[in-house]
Image (cartoon, helix red, strand yellow):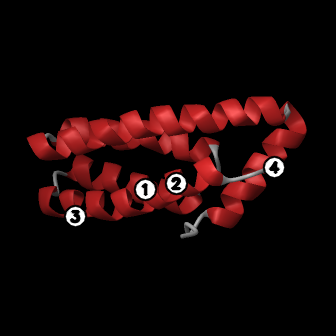
Amino acid sequence: MRPGDADQVEQRLRELSATLGAELVAEIIVMFQQDGSAQFSDLQNACQRRDLKALQSAAHRLLGSVLLIGARHLAQLCRKLELLARQGDEASAFAAVADLEQEFTILLTWVCQLEL
């Protein structure tokens, strides 16, 4: 399945590859896989603990990772979650985690299979 951000991410990674080289982009993808997965795990843990401050922080860290690879839609979901958590809107924040999880999983799988 192609993520909603597929075109932007592919363009961003191709631009990075032209500028930085394919080897460095391959490292960026591996870092996104590792760091993004760890950040998302932190987000899920914060959700399970019902810790809005930790949820806000985890969403912010994940935002940085998804912006690096150009995933604008996923970045919007991270910003939304970060805002909801900051505002203390627990029900909406936890619901937003489910949307973010679906998009993140699709993007992560797709990026790891992408051939540049």
Which residue is nearer to you in this view: 63 or 86?
63
Disc 1 is placed on an element classified as: helix
The residue lying at 28 percent from left, 36 percent from top is 42
Q: Which mark is residue 109?
A: 2
Q: Are marks 2 and 3 in contact (CB under 8 Å)?
A: no
Disc 3 is placed on an element classified as: helix
Which residue is nearer to you in this view: 93 or 24?
24
Q: Earlier in the sequence, mark 2 or mark 3?
A: 3
Task: Return the residue at label 4.
Answer: 14
**Three-letter amino acid code of the residue under disc 1:** Thr
How crowded pointer 3 is (Cα within 10 Å; few <14, some 14-19, many 20+) is rated as few
**Three-letter amino acid code of the residue under disc 3:** Ala
Task: Return the residue at label 3.
Answer: 95
Residue 6 image point, x, y percent: 64, 64
The residue lying at 25 percent from left, 46 percent from top is 86
Can residue 92 be seen here? The reply is: yes
Which residue is nearer to you in this view: 45 or 96?
45
Q: CA distance from mark 2 to mark 3?
A: 22 Å
